[in-house]
Structure formats: C-alpha cells, structure tokens
Image (cartoon, rainbow, N blue to C red):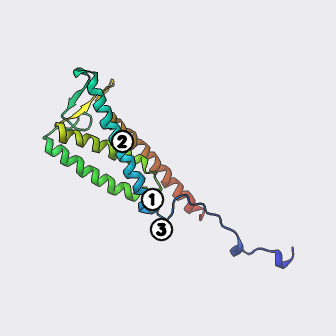
C-alpha cells in the first residue's frame, strides 16, 4: 500500500448519533426533557381525574374513599399526608431530573409517577381522601395508583439500562 493511501489513527471517521441535543457534559438539555415530562404528567392527571369522575356514575358502591396512604399502609392526618406527598414528589423530581438527563431516561416514565401523585393530592385536597374504584385481589386502587406503580418499575428498568449503556460506551471509548 502506498504511503499516501495509509490512514493514521487520527484520520479515522467517528460517527456519533445523537437523538437528543446535549450540553458540554453530554447531558440532555433540560428544556428538551422537561417539556414532555410536564405535558405527560398533566395527561396522567387528566386521565386519572376523568376516570374518577366517570366511576362516580357507576353507583355509590363503586367508589371507596381511601383515607390512608401507600396502598393503605400509612395513615395519619390529611394535612400530613398532603405535605408528605409534596415533599416526596419534590425529592423525586429532583432525583429524576438528574437521572433523566444523565442516563437519558424518557420523560414519560417519571411523568407517570408525578402525574399519579398529583392526582391523589388533588383528591386529598378536594375530598379529604383518595377515590379508589379498581378492585384487585390485593387492594382497591385507581388509575393514579396504577400509573405510579408502572412508572416506578419502568423508570427503574430504564435507569438500569441507561447506566449499563453508559458504562458500555465508556469502556469502548465511544
């Protein structure tokens, strides 16, 4: 091979595909992540409140009022439950915003959790208790509870996958 045709290591092409814009640290830009997060949270809240309103028309026995918290594991005064939910939600959003940016977690997953938490807080503020209407063998719950449970599971899986992807790319110098 002639000397002019040889490639030096610095002449190699490097192809990097970025779906989401990144800042200097390689983190996704905040606005690009938070806007869908907020809209998705709002959508979960609307669906939750809509299903609770629709369940009202099924009859008085179709809705159970849950004065407790966390699938009836924690009880207490209404003000403390509302304050506790807001504190947990604020801490969750702080952690999620960092993890979502660094591990590239889709905003829909934590939005399920936040939208469900807001839906239950709205019930506690308006009615003094959460309205549950989905009966399972384990508990009586609502769409907000299902959204919270599903959101936590898929968020944890996405974080694990993002962490693995980040370590794999770092190990290969990509």
Front-most of residues 10 and 143: 143
- Badge 3, how many Cα within 10 Å: few under 14, some, many 20+? few
Indicate the position of residue 70 as horizontal and vertical percent values: 26, 38
Indicate the position of residue 153 as horizontal and vertical percent values: 41, 42
- Quick one: quadrant of the C terminus? bottom right
Query: How much space separates mark 2 and mark 3, taking CA atoms?
Result: 29 Å
Residue extending furthest right?
1
Residue 56 against residue 101 in the figure, above or below: above
Residue 100 against residue 58 in the figure, above or below: below
- Name the residue rendered at 33%, 54% in the picture: 93
Query: How much space separates mark 2 and mark 1, taking CA atoms?
Result: 19 Å
Q: Quadrant of residue 98?
A: bottom left
Mark positioned earlier in the residue sequence (3 or 1): 3
Residue 11 against residue 136 in the figure, above or below: below
Mark positioned earlier in the residue sequence (2 or 3): 3
SS at mark 3?
loop
Residue 1 against residue 141 in the figure, above or below: below
Q: Which residue is mark 1?
A: 32
Q: Nearer the viewer, mark 2 or mark 3?
A: 2
- Badge 1, how many Cα within 10 Å: few under 14, some, many 20+? some
What count of labels does the image hold?
Answer: 3
Q: Which residue is mark 2?
A: 44
């Amino acid at each position: 091979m002639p000397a002019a045709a040889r490639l030096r290591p610095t002449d190699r092409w490097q192809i990097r595909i970025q779906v989401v814009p990144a800042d200097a640290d390689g983190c996704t830009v905040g606005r690009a992540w938070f806007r869908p997060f907020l809209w998705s949270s709002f959508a979960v809240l609307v669906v939750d409140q809509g299903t609770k309103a629709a369940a009202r028309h099924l009859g008085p026995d179709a809705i159970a009022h849950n004065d407790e918290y966390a699938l009836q594991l924690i009880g207490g005064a209404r003000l403390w439950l509302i304050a506790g939910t807001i504190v947990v939600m604020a801490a969750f959003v702080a952690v999620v915003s960092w993890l979502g940016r660094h591990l590239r977690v889709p905003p829909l997953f934590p939005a399920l959790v936040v939208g469900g938490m807001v839906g239950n807080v709205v019930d506690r503020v308006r009615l003094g208790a959460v309205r549950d209407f989905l009966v399972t063998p384990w508990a009586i719950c609502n769409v907000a509870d299902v959204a919270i449970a599903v959101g936590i599971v898929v968020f944890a899986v996405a974080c694990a996958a993002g962490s693995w992807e980040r370590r794999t790319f770092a190990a290969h110098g990509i």
